[in-house]
Image (cartoon, rainbow, N blue to C red):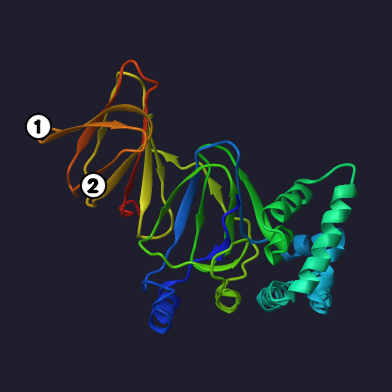
Amino acid sequence: KVLSIQAHPDKQLAAQLYTERPNVYKDPNHKPEMAVALTDDFEAMCGFRPIYDIASNMLDYPEFTDLIGDVRYEVLQYVAGGKGVNPKPILQKLFHKFITTDDKDIQKNLDKIVKRLGEKESHTDLDNLIIKLSKQFPGDSGIFTPIIFNYLKLKTGDAFYIGANEPHAYIQGEILECMACSDNVVRAGLTPKLKDVDTLVKMLTYKCTMPEVTRGTKKDKNCTLYVPPIDDFAMEIVEVKPGETYNLNEVVSPSVILTLNGAGVLEQGYVQTLPISFGKAAFMSASTSATITADIDGPGLKIVRALSNVHL
């Protein structure tokens, strides 16, 4: 089931929300995050589509266009001759207009779009996603968001970074997610949880760019490094063949190790030896090293090490 349309505040907004509503926003920290696909069927929405794509989708999905009223003309005027003009005010109006539309109007237009798409002989990926969301969250305005948000499909090992104040929602598949230390989430749709639409509308960046998808950087034949553009964290994914050993070099940061697949042994010299297998975690102190050895009779060993971003 899709994970809610949400964004995480930057440090300044997080401090403000924590001061004003500590019962909802539990800490004053930001929460940038990075997602690495663990399966080949991972899908997500993240950030706003280029405004030209949104304008095109408005023609293909008139049920959505009807919800945004006169804002449609501002979008079309921009597309006709808005080079060099910041589209943020238009996108903010568009998003606010439809996400705050009366529930009866949302339901009426959802009924129309679901009926029309159901009668089509063939469907686009966007059609299928709208149909899927309509079944999971009937009557939710967030069903229309694929029309304006980027739709990503990732394979195992693909990753993307989600900065502060960027809207996103995970749709399906399994991921490894690493983030800054915070519980702050501002939601606006596709969820039974608390929605804070006003805050979300005000906080978003309204950047019209597709997130950069990376496969990380090969540190060596075993280790792939994922480095986001922030200091808070980085990830190393290490794969070891059956019976082989790999050395986790010391870094000037504490580390958390999580076993993703297989089984083996984690050793820190003569200090400690730990058996590791799927789901087991271990903590490494800063400036210490360790070795991991994959069981010779197993499928090999795959672990991730999360640490402060010492690679920037």
> Does residue 78 show up?
no
Q: Secondary structure at mark 1?
A: loop
> Residue drawn 57% across and 73% down?
200
Q: Residue 27 at x, y = what percent?
A: 36, 72
Percent coordinates x, y for residue 84 in the rendering: 70, 74
Number of numbered tags placed on the structure image: 2
Residue 231, placed above or below residue 74 = above
Q: Quadrant of the C terminus?
A: bottom left
- How many neighbours does mark 2 have within 10 angstroms: few (below 14), some (14-19), or many (20 or more)? some
230 sits left or right of 70 in the view: left
Q: Position of residue 9 (x, y in %)?
A: 47, 71
The vertical placement of 295 against 175, above or below, is above
Residue for badge 1: 270
Quarter of the image holding residue 274? top left
**On the image, which quarter does residue 71 sit in?**
bottom right
Q: Which residue is mark 2?
A: 251
Q: Amino acid under label 2?
A: Val
Q: What secondary structure is marked by label 2?
A: loop
Seen at 45% across and 71% down, the residue is: 10
- The amino acid pointed to by label 1 is Tyr
Task: List x then y, in percent, for residue 99.
Answer: 69, 72
Q: How far, Cα to Cα, is label 2 from label 1?
A: 19 Å
Vertically, is 188 above or below 308? Answer: below
**Quick one: label 1, few (<14), some, or many (20+) residues within 10 Å?**
few
Q: Residue furthest left?
A: 270
Which residue is rendered at x = 44% and y = 68% of the image?
184
Residue at point 68% right, 79% down? 89
